[in-house]
Image: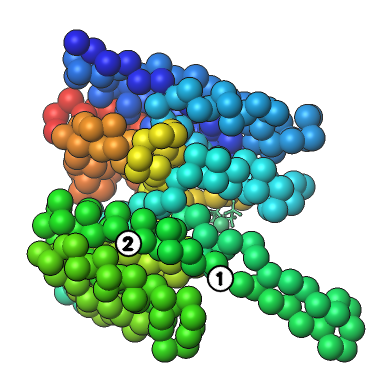
Amino acid sequence: MTRTYKIAVIPGDGIGPEVINEGVKALTKLAETDSRFDFDFTYFPWGCEYYLEHGKMMAEDGIVQLKEFDAIYLGSVGYPGVPDHISLWDLLLKIRKSFDQYVNLRPITLLHENMCPLKNDKKDNIDMLVIRENSEGEYAGAGDWLYKGQKEEVVLQTGVFSRKGTERIIRYAYETAKSEGRSLTSVSKGNALNYSMVFWDQIFEEVGKEFPDVQTQSYLVDAASMFMVQQPERFEIVVTSNLFGDILTDLGAALAGGLGLAAGANINPERRYPSMFEPVHGSAPDIAGKGIANPLAAVWSASQMLDFLGYDDQGKRLLKAIERLLIDGGCLTPDMGGQASTADVGSRIVEYLSIV
Ligand code: ATP
Ligand code: MG
């Protein structure tokens, strides 16, 4: 029996619609070749253009509408003329928060050595999954601005680490490491952040007692940044806080092919609400409308969606198609050193899906 998944597509701004189009092409092709599932895509015209017309980034009841879907597939939001804090908070963060997507999954896997700027022989060993806390921590938005504009001015930015929030992300990471049979690395900074990161380290140890078979290590974030470049083979599953995860995954993206290849998923593991799949990159206004954006990050995010829906064989197949495209090297967008268009790359992926 075929199960039909309702997917909410929010193409968004700038290159968002261009790259999402190619991801939808790949998902459609896979659904055609697999009798287990089908997709029913519903498009939502939300984003900055919508904001300029309606004064908000999404419909008033947007969250209620989205709640009915099995997953959300998002391009990118943000455009010059609309302040970042509006585009970010009024759509992206609103969805992440409303649907309690507290796990941010960012795979850092080098599919072809040409995509890596490193000159050493470590390239074969870049294959990690960063599990970033996505709901609190340094990005909780807590703080104060005292004596504004005066000589005594003091600004406070508070990291918020609840037991519930910290335990659940660390437990998710242990479970992932256990089920994949891989090691787990916690990245923190207990020597300098004497409340939040001491607490983090403590929880990492506590929860670890439930998973005696998982091999673990802990690094300070500064050391982890160095090792990621010099000895990336040290990392398999990585769990870290919101801020550290944000920074480390940009470093990771640079190692594995740049923003054009960096995929991300915002997961609600309990599946009470829809999870959201989106490339890490933004709307890239500088290249929007030219048809040259790299769609592979969006396609990779689609592969994460397949994994999450329970079809990881098809998720892997899609990744294989990306790998084939990189190895072949004849159909790459300019950011990867080629001359192909966004649509060329997307169509080539669909062609490869017939042979991988
Ligand atoms: P935002 O604030 O939305 O994150 P940004 O300009 O800070 O936007 P990105 O939009 O992620 O950051 O892009 C940074 C630069 O990387 C872009 O200007 C663009 O040149 C390049 N870039 C990002 N994504 C892609 C892509 N998919 N294909 C090609 N180039 C890209
Ligand atoms: Mg950016």
Compared with residue 107, is residue 318 higher up or lower down, i.e. above or below? above
Q: Residue furthest top?
A: 1
- The dot on residue 159 is 1
Which residue position is annotated with label 2?
170
> Where is the N terminus found, in terms of image quarters?
top left
Q: Position of residue 299 (x, y in %)?
A: 36, 38
Q: Indicate the secondary structure of the residue bearing disc 2.
A: helix
State which quadrant residue 211 falls in: bottom left
Residue ranking furthest to the right: 150
The reply to whether residue 293 is visible in this rendering is no
Mark 1 to mark 2 CA distance (whole Å): 17 Å
Instruction: Give the quadrant of ligand 2.
Output: bottom right
Q: Are marks 1 and 2 in contact (CB under 8 Å)?
A: no
**Is 287 left or right of 222, judged from the image as shown?**
right
Q: What is the three-letter code of the residue carrying label 1?
A: Gly
Near mark 2 (Cα within 10 A), the count class, few <14, some 14-19 or many ≥20, is many
Question: Which quadrant of the figure has residue 125?
Answer: bottom left
Label 1 residue near ligand 2, CB within 8 Å: no
167 or 223, which lies in front?
167
**What numbered label is drawn on residue 270?**
none
Type of amino acid at the residue the image marks with label 2: Ile
Q: Earlier in the sequence, mark 1 or mark 2?
A: 1
The x and y percentages for residue 344 are 38, 33
Residue 329 location, x and y as percent? Answer: 26, 47
The residue sitting at 74% across, 71% down in the picture is 144
Going by the image, does 38 lie left or right of 177?
Answer: right
